[in-house]
């Protein structure tokens, strides 16, 4: 009888209901074989909500110029620079021994995506379960939908910090959402380890690119400012090149720590009193960072 009631409960649930109760449903006796389907249903519901947050998708670009044979593979809006092409052809005499233009003789102007490394560090402890976790997943999906090719790293932390996506890793938005939903919600909030995990991920990314800590990398920390494990993490903030703190909820007691983290991290503080606003606010914060207009 209990199994029948649970089955009816699931059958009558909407896709968003499944997303908000994903951990509850998959942990029920007899539902283990449905975990994959539940995860896919939840990810689909999250993506639908994320797409509703976005309007027209506009990617930041860099303007460039050069010869047609040397333009980057990801160049867009390629237009011939007729004046430059004719001037160099006349002055250079590079075509004296052959007829016609080659791609080396044609000068063009073009645009390329402007990419900036970014680390998102998100609290997934018990205080972020249920609908809170699902809405946070929507916020992450919004970012990846808007900036699919940017070097974005994602850290989730509760008892410990977990790398969900490396900056150089290319995965689908649905796969990222499924990874995020499967993070176990533990009883403690180890904010110190979450920030330490972000620093480690930055350093690894720098070593892969042949440099140390990237100077232009930004970190967005999503937290309510409370921690129940580890030390006060303020000592880590000065190690970040640029730290933006998104303070969740209306709790005032933890507001000062969030202010200190943002100040010491040479960044800014954004308060998000209502969880429902998180996707839109995160979208705005990340857009400003990647376009070089980070708020101070």
Image (cartoon, grey):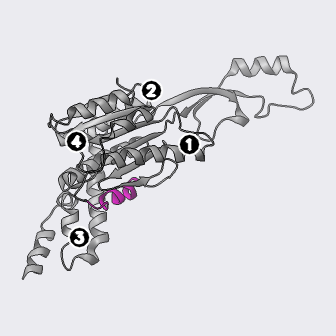
Of the numbered discs 2 and 3, the one sitting upstream in the chain is 3
Q: Residue 255, percent across and down?
A: 21, 33
Is residue 243 covered in magenta? no
Residue 92 is left or right of residue 193, and the answer is: right
Residue 16 falls in which quadrant of the image?
A: bottom left
Q: Residue 203, percent across and down?
A: 52, 44
Of the numbered discs 4 and 2, the one sitting upstream in the chain is 4
Under circle 1, the secondary element is helix
Q: Residue 164, percent across and down?
A: 40, 55
Of the numbered discs 1 and 4, the one sitting upstream in the chain is 1
Disc 2/disc 1 C-alpha distance (Å) = 20 Å
Locate the C terminus by quadrant.
top left
By secondary structure, the bulk of the magenta-drawn segment is best described as helix
For the view shown, which residue lies furthest in the front direction? 231
Residue of label 2: 292
Residue of label 3: 26
Comparing labels 4 and 2, the label whose residue is closer to the camera = 4
Label 2 with label 3: CB-CB less than 8 Å: no
Residue of label 4: 224
Disc 4/disc 2 C-alpha distance (Å) = 26 Å
In this rendering, is residue 83 above or below 227?
above
Of the numbered discs 3 and 1, the one sitting upstream in the chain is 3
Residue of label 1: 206
Disc 3/disc 4 C-alpha distance (Å) = 27 Å
Tell me which segment is drawn in magenta.
Answer: 173-185
Disc 3/disc 1 C-alpha distance (Å) = 38 Å
């Amino acid at each position: 009888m209990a199994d029948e009631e649970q089955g009816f409960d699931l059958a009558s649930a909407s896709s968003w209901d499944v997303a908000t109760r994903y951990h509850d449903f998959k942990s029920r006796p007899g539902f283990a074989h449905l975990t994959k389907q539940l995860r896919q249903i939840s990810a689909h519901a999250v993506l639908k909500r994320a797409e509703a947050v976005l309007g027209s998708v506009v990617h930041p670009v860099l303007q460039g110029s050069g010869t047609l044979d040397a333009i980057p593979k990801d160049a867009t809006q390629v237009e011939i620079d007729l004046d430059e092409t004719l001037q160099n052809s006349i002055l250079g005499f590079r075509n004296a021994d052959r007829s016609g233009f080659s791609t080396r003789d044609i000068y063009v102007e073009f645009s390329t995506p402007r990419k900036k490394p970014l680390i998102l560090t998100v609290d997934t402890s018990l205080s972020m379960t249920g609908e809170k976790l699902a809405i946070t997943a929507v916020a992450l999906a919004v970012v990846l939908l808007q900036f699919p090719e940017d070097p974005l790293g994602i850290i989730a932390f509760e008892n410990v910090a977990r790398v969900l996506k490396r900056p150089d890793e290319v995965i689908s938005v649905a796969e990222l959402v499924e990874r995020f939903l499967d993070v176990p919600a533990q009883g403690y909030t180890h904010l110190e380890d979450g920030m330490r995990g972000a620093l480690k991920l930055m350093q690894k990314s720098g070593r892969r690119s042949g440099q140390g800590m990237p100077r232009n990398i930004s970190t967005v920390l999503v937290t309510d400012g409370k921690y129940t494990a580890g030390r006060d993490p303020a000592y880590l903030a000065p190690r970040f090149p640029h730290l933006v703190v998104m303070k969740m909820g209306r709790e005032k007691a933890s507001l000062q720590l969030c202010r200190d983290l943002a100040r010491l991290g040479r960044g800014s503080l954004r308060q998000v009193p209502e969880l429902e606003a998180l996707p839109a606010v995160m979208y705005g914060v990340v857009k400003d960072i990647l376009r070089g207009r980070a708020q101070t």
